[in-house]
Amino acid sequence: MFLSKKEKKKTRKEKDITLCKSMKDFSEEEYFVKKLEKAKESLNKWGLPKELPTNNK
């Protein structure tokens, strides 16, 4: 995808992800806060596997 100079100013590249500076921050939305709480509860209850696969490139 090719971006115009104006569009490039509104974005920035972080590793393999393009972030849009005008995108709304959803980190405080009720849905995502609840999902994060449930994920933390699950991790505390079951933990992580001892041998996690690594993605070494």
Image: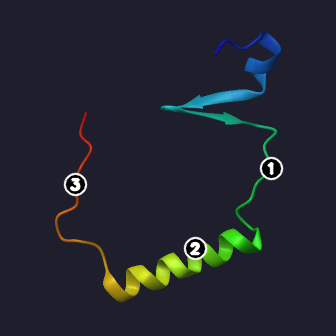
Q: Secondary structure at mark 1?
A: loop
Q: Quadrant of the C terminus?
A: top left
> Label 2 crowding class (10 Å Cα cut-off): few <14, some 14-19, many 20+?
few
Kind of residue at badge 2: Leu
Q: Residues within 10 Å of mark 3 (few under 14, many from 20)?
A: few
Sequence-first tag of 2 and 1: 1
**Tag shown at residue 56:** none
Residue indicated by mark 2: 36
For the view shown, which residue lies furthest in the bottom direction? Answer: 45
Q: Residue at x 80, y 50 (%)?
A: 24
Q: Is residue 12 above or below residue 46?
A: above
Q: Secondary structure at mark 3?
A: loop
Looking at the picture, which amino acid does disc 3 mark?
Pro
In the drawing, what numbered circle is on residue 53? Answer: 3
Q: Is 43 above or below relative to 32?
A: below
As shown in the figure, which amino acid type bears the numbered disc 1? Lys
Residue at x 57% of width, y 80% of height:
37
Residue at 17 percent across and 64 percent down: it is 51
Q: Quadrant of residue 38?
A: bottom right
Q: Give the number of marks.
A: 3
